Image (tube, rainbow, N blue to C red):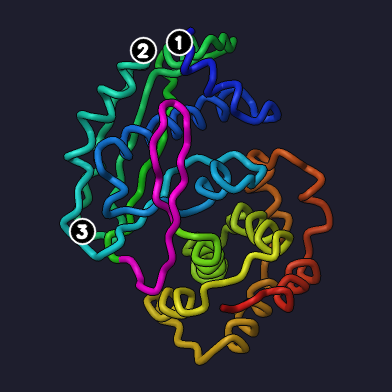
């Protein structure tokens, strides 16, 4: 096995299954390639995966979520695709990178890094029985091309696969994004339990909320609030209406510490509201 791939696998949490560990390594490789291509000059890394890779959130994650620093509806992944494929190939990994064509003018631009599971696993020195010949492993990339303002960013400096830098939203801004997701995520009747798992992480670590950014996100979603108290009332109503069995079912495959899924209830999540520090 390539020594860099071996190091990436050693860096991953041993509680993860093989698929999650390999996918996380692919995520780190993707970030390294994007960094080398100047991607983070105009883009910030956001979402639960940023929290997992750089802030110790103990759950696995599927996608890489990003936001432009300035709106640009004409953004495309095109300039980065060739470099991504070449970077993976330099590590003896064969992948295909494609950008999703959208028929309408969406605020999200999407691309996928895909490889054949059996081939990718073998490159990482992993042999998993029962894998179908055509089964694929993929990393989804999404960029918000119409971002809100009033955000804060910071830089991380990973050493693997090779030294590079990643711009991401700072923790208060990430917290505001997650509260917005709790209030506004459009999943129909389903609940994204990963949002709620992450909220407990923010609360347990006493991470403040970027209030201006949250209010702007809410306004873009059609929710006008005058301040903190209205936000708290919205959260109370939301937490009272959630099906927590569904929430736990969603996050269970990703949570590395299952005991953290115990006793989920309206009362538990409502108790986090008074702990919020708005800044």
Identify the residue shown where x is 30% and y is 41%: 111
Q: In which quarter of the image is the C terminus?
A: bottom right
Task: Give the magenta-colored segment's residue range.
Answer: 147-168
**Residue 207 drawn at (x, y percent):** 64, 65
Q: Tell me whether circle 2 and circle 1 mark residues in contact (CB < 8 Å).
A: yes
Q: Circle 2 is placed at which residue position?
A: 92
For marks 2 and 3, give the CA distance.
37 Å
Q: Circle 3 is placed at which residue position?
A: 104
**Residue 175 drawn at (x, y percent):** 56, 64
Disc 3 packing (10 Å; few <14; some 14–19; many ≥20): few
Identify the residue shown where x is 68% and y is 71%: 239
Instruction: Residue 94: name its quadrant.
Output: top left
Q: Which mark is residue 195?
A: none
Between 279 and 228, the one nearer to me in the picture: 279
- Mark toward the start of the polypeptide (2 vs 1): 1
For marks 3 and 1, give the CA distance.
42 Å
> Is residue 151 left or right of 178 when viewed as pictured?
left
Identify the residue shown where x is 51% and y is 69%: 180
Disc 1 packing (10 Å; few <14; some 14–19; many ≥20): few
**Residue 87 drawn at (x, y percent):** 30, 24
Is 235 in the magenta? no
Is 163 in the magenta? yes
Q: Tell me whether circle 3 and circle 1 mark residues in contact (CB < 8 Å).
A: no
Q: Circle 1 is placed at which residue position?
A: 2
Instruction: Residue 200: name its quadrant.
Output: bottom right
Where disc 3 sits, the SS reads loop
- Mark toward the start of the polypeptide (2 vs 3): 2
Q: Tell me whether circle 2 and circle 3 mark residues in contact (CB < 8 Å).
A: no
Look at discs 2 and 3 and give the one toward the viewer. 2
> Is residue 83 left or right of 161 when viewed as pictured?
left
Identify the residue shown where x is 27% and y is 51%: 41
Instruction: Residue 77: name its quadrant.
Output: top left
């Amino acid at each position: 096995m390539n020594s860099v791939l071996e190091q990436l696998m050693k860096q991953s949490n041993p509680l993860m299954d093989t698929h999650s560990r390999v996918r996380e390594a692919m995520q780190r490789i993707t970030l390294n390639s994007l960094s080398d291509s100047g991607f983070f000059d105009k883009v910030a890394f956001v979402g639960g995966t940023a929290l997992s890779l750089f802030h110790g959130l103990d759950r696995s994650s599927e996608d890489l979520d990003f936001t432009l620093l300035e709106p640009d509806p004409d953004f495309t992944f095109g300039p980065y695709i060739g470099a991504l494929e070449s970077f993976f190939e330099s590590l003896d990994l064969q992948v295909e990178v494609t950008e999703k064509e959208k028929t309408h003018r969406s605020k999200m631009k999407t691309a996928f890094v895909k490889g054949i599971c059996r081939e990718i696993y073998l490159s990482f020195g992993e042999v998993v029985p029962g894998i179908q010949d055509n089964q694929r492993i993929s990393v989804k990339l999404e960029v918000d091309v119409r971002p809100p303002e009033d955000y804060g960013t910071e830089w991380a400096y990973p050493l693997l696969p090779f030294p590079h830098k990643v711009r991401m939203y700072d923790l208060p801004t990430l917290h505001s994004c997650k509260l917005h997701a709790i209030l506004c995520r459009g999943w129909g009747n389903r609940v994204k339990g990963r949002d709620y798992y992450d909220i407990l992480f923010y609360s347990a670590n006493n991470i403040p909320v970027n209030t201006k950014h949250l209010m702007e996100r809410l306004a873009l979603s059609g929710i006008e609030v005058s301040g903190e108290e209205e936000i708290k009332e919205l959260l109370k109503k939301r937490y009272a209406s959630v099906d927590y069995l569904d929430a736990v079912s969603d996050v269970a495959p990703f949570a590395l510490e299952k005991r953290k899924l115990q006793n989920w209830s309206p009362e538990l999540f409502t108790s986090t509201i008074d702990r919020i520090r708005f800044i």
